[in-house]
Amino acid sequence: MRKIALHLIASAAVILASVSCQNASVTLTRVDPFEKLLPETVIDRPYTQVEEVAAGEHATFQFALRGADQLKEVSLSAEPLKDGQGHVLEDVTIGFVDFVHVGRTTPTQGRDAIRSASGLYPDPIVDDGETRDIAFGKTQPIWVSVNVPKDAAPGEYKGKVRVGGKGLDVEGEIAVKVYPVVLDDPTLWVTNWFNCTERTFRHFDQQGEMYSESYWEYIKAIALKMKECYQNTVLIPTTIIDSKKDGDSWSFDFTNFDKMVGIFQEAGVLKCLEVGHIGGRIGLWNSPFGVRVPGMVGNIPLDNPEAQDYCSKFIPALVSHIKEKGWYSLYCQHIADEPAADNYDSYVAIAHLFKKYAPEVKIIEACHSHDLADIVDIWVPQLNFYADGLSFYQDRQKAGDEVWFYTCLAPQGNYANRFLEQPLLKTRLLHWINFRYGATGYLHWGFNVWREDDPWYESTFINTEGGNILPGGDSWIVYPGDKRLYGSIRFEAMRDGIADYTLLQMLARKDEAKAKEICRQTVYDWTTYDMSTDHFRSARHEILEALSK
């Protein structure tokens, strides 16, 4: 059987820099960007590989800064990268990687879980240019991201990063090899559900009013951040539609709905319009579904006359409005989240009512049931359910349905996910799983569902409905700041995994067997992956070499 040859290229870049600073030794060491540096991590050897990318991708670098004394007023800067022909890569960002706390560890951990003595894990990237003090003996990760434009000339580019401060001046070099390959626009359907309620808005603007100019700046910041990770599908909640009843008549004001859709369209991330759920569970997990009726508390059983009346007015008005706005070809509809065997009948009843008024609209659902054929059009099983029912979902694809998958607080164990306690490579491999098993989309519920208190410290939740722990990293992948959002190392890993999926697609059009075999040697099955970063880069090298010919 063919094996991918290990391809290691020694970088000519300076990878370790050290100075003496006020009688204190300071080291700036380039390390593998897949390594999650904990505050207590001691670097035993520097990282020595050149980063290889296609034009249109990002190259990422990580440095570890450590001092034998407190470092004060530390600042970061990075210069553009240049090749020997005068070409320049100008879009370079640099930031500190902050640590967040995992107070409740994931109940079922995988064989490669990262265990932190302090409970702190690296995640948010703070790239706002502010200086900071770094405690003695603490390893401080520094993240560098180079945005390689699609028109970048092939070649090897080099540049420097600098770390300054009181009595501190140290630098390191970075190098990128750009292949003569241009990344296609990603076609993988990607949706991260976002929260646009007052609770999360308050983290962005403590004094802002809902639906004020500041609120719409918040939505714009979300849209632009989504664009950075190739998101192209957006769930717009129906709760922002102002519904009022006057006697026997209902009126619907779509002003806020239209404004929100327009912002995501302008950002270039809305190629599929997911309209949010019209129903939900009446009680706990096993309870039947009802529908949301404005002015009534909770979800109302569909056999309630008020629920029937509202749905008979709201659904036609929603569909008609989307048609009038020219969004009908983009439109798909959620009914109620995660239907399972116990609430199958109530789900089907609401879905049939919706189809009565909109028979052509596709229904998309994160689902726990196979019993929804001829109802659901876009199946989004949880990753472990996708594994268990692969043949069923392949049959649905043959019948013309779409199949995506999703992750949330589950699956755990050895499955890939976005948890803080997992290696960063596992987050990136989620989209190799997309390619390996033919799922054409990915859904995650937690783009920015921040805790009401400080999301920059504690990252875990207790799910009060079922007593489940929402693991660190499950509820958000971006972080709030004053009138801005910050990314994270997991966010960048997800982005780069989508680029990997796209490169595998490109190679499959040229040599399908080769693309599948490279992917198979990286994702062996649903829970077994080659977690060697050397192997991973060797696989990417083979893809880029094949696409270059």
Image: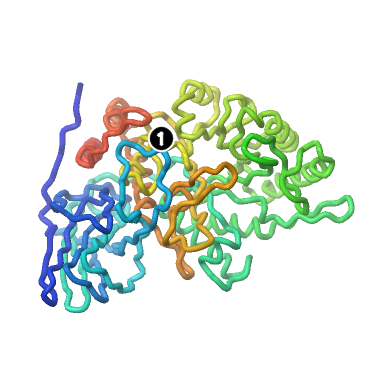
Depth check: give the residue in front, 438 or 135.
Answer: 135
Query: Which quadrant would the N terminus be assigned to in this image?
Result: top left
Mark yes or no: residue 549 visible.
no
Q: Amino acid at mark 1?
A: Asn
Q: Residue at x 68, y 33 (%)?
A: 347
- Kindly state the secondary structure of the residue where label 1 is placed: helix
Q: Residue furthest right?
A: 247
Q: Position of residue 388 (x, y in %)?
A: 46, 25
546 in relation to 106, above or below: above
Mark yes or no: residue 237 visible.
yes
Q: Residue at x 51, y 58 (%)?
A: 451
Depth check: give the residue in front, 499 or 512.
Answer: 499
177 sits left or right of 215 in the view? left
Q: Which residue is mark 1?
A: 434
539 sits left or right of 207 in the view? left
Q: Position of residue 410 (x, y in %)?
A: 47, 38
Answer few, some or many: residues within 10 Å of disc 1's Cα (few below 14, many 20 plus, some between 14 and 19). many
Q: Position of residue 325 (x, y in %)?
A: 66, 51
54 in relation to 217, above or below: above
231 sits left or right of 316 in the view? left
Q: Residue at x 31, y 46 (%)?
A: 114
How many marks on residues? Answer: 1
Q: Residue at x 31, y 47 (%)?
A: 115
In this figure, which colouring scheme has been used for the structure? rainbow
Q: Position of residue 452 (x, y in %)?
A: 54, 61
Query: Which quadrant would the C terminus be assigned to in this image?
Result: top left
